[in-house]
Amino acid sequence: MCLGVPMQVLSVSPGRALAAGRGRTCEVETALVGAVEAGDWLLVFLDSARERISAERAAEVDATLDLLEQALGGGAADAAAGFALPSALSAAELAALTGSPSSPDSADGAATR
């Protein structure tokens, strides 16, 4: 599994950018996202930028990765994430998020599996 890491561009060179995020700084390829500028936020997979994102989206991804690290480390991952987790959504909200029809079998509002 490959996880995207939000990183902020520090400086730019042709086809590449020096970016920082989640405690590390590295050079990333930018061919898939086009021209970037210092201050831009990127979603980076294996040192390659795959998507340009907003600062707000970067904060959401960081919060999610923090929760994942807590869960994997044996800590409680029930801290407020700052956004609605899919498990907190009703069946109709989850269906709208995923583009799937909601299940009429779900009486308690949770998505069926």
Image (tube, rainbow, N blue to C red):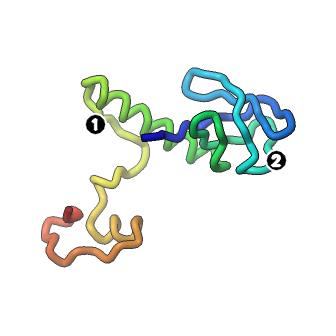
Dot 1 amino acid type:
Asp
Disc 1 target residue: 78
Q: What is the CA distance from the residue labelled 1 to the residue labelled 2? A: 38 Å
Mark 2: secondary structure: loop
Disc 2 target residue: 35
Left or right, residue 51 beside residue 3: right
Q: On screen, 101 above or below 1?
A: below
Q: Residue 16: x percent and y percent?
A: 78, 36
Q: Residue 54: x percent and y percent?
A: 64, 48
Name the residue: 74% across, 29% down.
Answer: 18
The foreground one among 30 and 40 is: 30
The foreground one among 46 and 96 is: 46
Asked which quadrant contains residue 109, the reply is bottom left
Q: On screen, 104 above or below 45?
A: below
Say which quadrant the N terminus sits in. Answer: top left
Name the residue: 68% across, 34% down.
Answer: 8
Name the residue: 34% across, 70% down.
Answer: 95
The foreground one among 13 and 78 is: 13
